[in-house]
């Protein structure tokens, strides 16, 4: 007995020591993660070591890079000599199509033509040096290439006064006043950052006054969501109500911005009964909310509310970004369990297969996730500015450096529009949920590979049989359109795919009348053969203008007809009686 008691005491003591060690590690990692803004230095060091070691073991690649240096030097010298006699001679290297830093004609004048051409040649050389090294893992290669690009963007000649002719021209024209105004802009931004105030100009876009003004009522509320039902604008409406599930990474009103570009208002004016989920901004008390909580208390309870308010009607469900991923999970579980309430599904810039999820995946590996989880450990949530910073890094050339040149060196304060003001209205993410979706969806790709469980059982997107309308955007840094397109491989249901101009946000908020908008659209019938994305893009017809009317036509095609509009909320079920006017209270939480 004594021996057994001693053994149990030893196990208890060992377990207590393990917990203490784990707590100490978590605390130490949390302190370091806060210092590095959640980025893992170990992940970056491993990537650079992998690249450097394999490059050192590749003499052929080294010889190729040295030859490239010599060729580039010869090209540069020839260009320098020709440009003396002919200022408009052909440059030795052209910037990428999306790189507008050197578009001003002043960059073609000596010596700025030589400065920017030398920089672009260096940029090309580093891309060749960081890619195509035999033996390096694909993930590490992408990390090193991305890091080299970020480093070069910092040292672009466009970022410095002596090497930027546009800045020098503005200084001369204003007698130096442009730099003075730039200094004032910088100090104002620094003050706002220190005081945790929103950017300048956001005061012109107040929620409920300037944006999110479509009339409606909050008809349901739980701890996680408010459900808004919008007032009808037509004598009759389509029989099937529309339920929109936005991402919890963003405030819902990106889909209800100003009256002229509100998707919600557009749908209402086209005769749809529209509901939308407004997610609560979580705090430390919500640290243990997981993906299943978001599915159940978000999507499923919203579906129950819509079914109670508009009884005996199927529902057109719409998901945006991760809201679309969550909707796909819920729809697969519903199909598995025989729940047939959905009439159709629309996914806007939403991934279901995360194996090739673009450059956002550079921030997602075991080392990075351990570091990120440590950074969330003490607070219980991820700060909104951390996610915003990651998105900025994906397009730092335009979102960071070009903006700083314009506002701090040229002294030009860009006027905020409604989309930019919305983008500054940040949200947090609970510890458990953020960890689960990064590990299970991004890192493990469990949804596409049949391992994601709902109610203890796996779900399969192949079970979805209702028609699908899927939208990808050409310049999406968050959900690249070829990744969104992969849903073709995961279900045999009828699938209409739209590829629209613009990026992750501006491509979706693309109202009729918006200038310079175009889209391609094609439908694959249920059970038809797969078409790869390259062939699809080559063959799908191109249309000028917004894709919204094409979507509205699809919704009307899959409708049972027009009926009298339902009341706001339910007269028979107290749980769904109107609580507040739209936009509700959760959207205003800071």
Image (cartoon, helix red, strand yellow):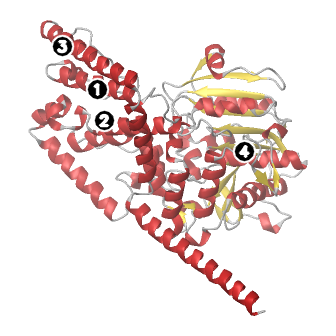
Q: Nearer the viewer, residue 251 or 205?
A: 251
What residue is at 74 percent from the left and 89 percent from the top? Answer: 3
Left or right position of 370 against 184: right
**x%, y% of residue 130?**
40, 31
Q: Can residue 582 be seen in the rendering of this structure?
A: no
Instruction: Report, in whole angstroms, how far the alpha carbon at label 4 lies from the one at label 1.
Output: 41 Å
Considering only order in the chain, which callout, 1 or 2, is on the residue closer to the N terminus?
Answer: 1
Identify the residue position indicated by label 2 in the image: 152
**x%, y% of residue 56?**
37, 32
Considering only order in the chain, which callout, 3 or 2, is on the residue closer to the N terminus?
Answer: 3
Identify the residue position indicated by label 1 in the image: 122
Mark 2–mark 1 CB contact (< 8 Å): yes
**Residue extending furthest front?**
3
Mark 4–mark 2 CB contact (< 8 Å): no
Label 3 secondary element: helix
Q: Toward which corner of the image does residue 143 lie, by quadrant?
A: top left
Instruction: Report, in whole angstroms, how far the alpha carbon at label 2 lies from the one at label 1.
Output: 9 Å
Q: Toward which corner of the image does residue 296 lie, by quadrant?
A: bottom right
Identify the residue position indicated by label 3 in the image: 77
Label 1 secondary element: helix
Considering only order in the chain, which callout, 2 or 4, is on the residue closer to the N terminus?
Answer: 2
Instruction: Report, in whole angstroms, how far the alpha carbon at label 2 lies from the one at label 3.
Output: 22 Å
Q: Can residue 65 be seen in the rendering of this structure?
A: yes
Left or right position of 224 against 411: right
Q: Is residue 191 above or below residue 116?
A: below
**x%, y% of residue 479?**
57, 38
Considering only order in the chain, which callout, 3 or 4, is on the residue closer to the N terminus?
Answer: 3
């Amino acid at each position: 007995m004594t021996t057994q008691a001693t053994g149990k005491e030893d196990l208890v003591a060992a377990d207590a020591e393990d917990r203490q060690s784990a707590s100490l590690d978590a605390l130490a990692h949390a302190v370091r993660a806060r210092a590095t803004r959640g980025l893992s230095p170990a992940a970056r060091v491993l990537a650079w070591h992998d690249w450097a070691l394999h490059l050192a073991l590749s003499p052929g690649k080294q010889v190729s890079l040295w030859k490239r240096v010599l060729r580039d030097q010869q090209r540069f010298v020839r260009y320098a000599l020709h440009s003396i006699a002919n200022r408009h001679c052909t440059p030795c290297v052209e910037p990428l199509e999306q790189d507008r830093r050197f578009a001003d004609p002043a960059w073609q004048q000596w010596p700025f033509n030589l400065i920017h051409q030398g920089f672009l040649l260096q940029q090309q050389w580093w891309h060749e040096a960081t890619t195509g090294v035999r033996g390096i893992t694909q993930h590490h290669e992408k990390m090193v290439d991305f890091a080299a690009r970020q480093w070069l963007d910092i040292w672009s000649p466009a970022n410095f006064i002596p090497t930027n002719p546009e800045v020098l021209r503005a200084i001369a024209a204003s007698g130096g006043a442009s730099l003075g105004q730039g200094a004032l802009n910088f100090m104002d931004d620094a003050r706002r950052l220190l005081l945790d105030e929103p950017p300048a100009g956001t005061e012109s876009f107040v929620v409920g006054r300037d944006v999110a003004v479509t009339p409606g009522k909050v008809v349901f509320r739980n701890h996680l969501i408010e459900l808004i039902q919008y007032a009808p604008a037509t004598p009759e409406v389509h029989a099937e109500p529309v339920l929109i599930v936005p991402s919890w990474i963003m405030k819902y009103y990106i889909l209800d911005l100003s009256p002229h570009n509100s998707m919600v208002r557009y749908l209402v004016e086209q005769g749809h009964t529209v509901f939308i989920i407004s997610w609560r901004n979580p705090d430390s008390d919500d640290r243990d909310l997981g993906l299943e909580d978001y599915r159940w208390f978000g999507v499923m309870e919203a579906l129950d509310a819509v079914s109670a308010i508009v009884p005996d009607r199927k529902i057109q469900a719409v998901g945006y970004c991760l809201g679309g991923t969550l909707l796909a999970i819920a729809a697969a579980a519903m199909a598995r369990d025989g729940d047939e309430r959905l009439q159709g599904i629309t996914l806007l810039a939403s991934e279901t297969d995360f194996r090739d999820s673009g450059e956002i995946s550079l921030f997602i590996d075991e080392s990075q996730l351990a570091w990120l989880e440590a950074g969330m450990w003490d607070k219980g949530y991820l700060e909104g500015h951390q996610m915003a910073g990651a998105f900025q890094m994906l397009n730092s050339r335009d979102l960071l450096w070009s903006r700083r040149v314009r506002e701090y060196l040229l002294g030009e304060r860009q006027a905020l529009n409604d989309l930019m003001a919305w983008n500054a209205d940040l949200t947090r993410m609970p510890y458990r949920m953020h960890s689960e979706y990064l590990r299970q969806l991004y890192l493990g790709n469990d949804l596409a590979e049949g391992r994601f469980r709902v109610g203890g059982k796996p779900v399969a997107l192949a079970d979805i049989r209702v028609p699908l309308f899927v939208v990808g955007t050409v310049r999406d840094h968050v959900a690249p359109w070829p990744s969104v397109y992969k849903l073709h491989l995961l279900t045999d249901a009828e699938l209409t795919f739209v590829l629209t101009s613009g990026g992750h946000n501006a491509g979706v908020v693309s109202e009729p009348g918006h200038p310079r908008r175009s889209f391609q659209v094609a439908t694959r019938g249920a059970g038809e053969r797969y078409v790869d994305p390259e062939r699809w893009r080559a063959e799908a017809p191109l249309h000028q203008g917004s894709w919204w009317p094409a979507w509205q036509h699809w919704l009307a095609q899959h409708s049972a007809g027009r009926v009298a509009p339902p009341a706001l909320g339910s007269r028979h079920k107290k749980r769904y009686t109107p609580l507040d006017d739209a936009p509700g209270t959760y959207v205003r939480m800071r």
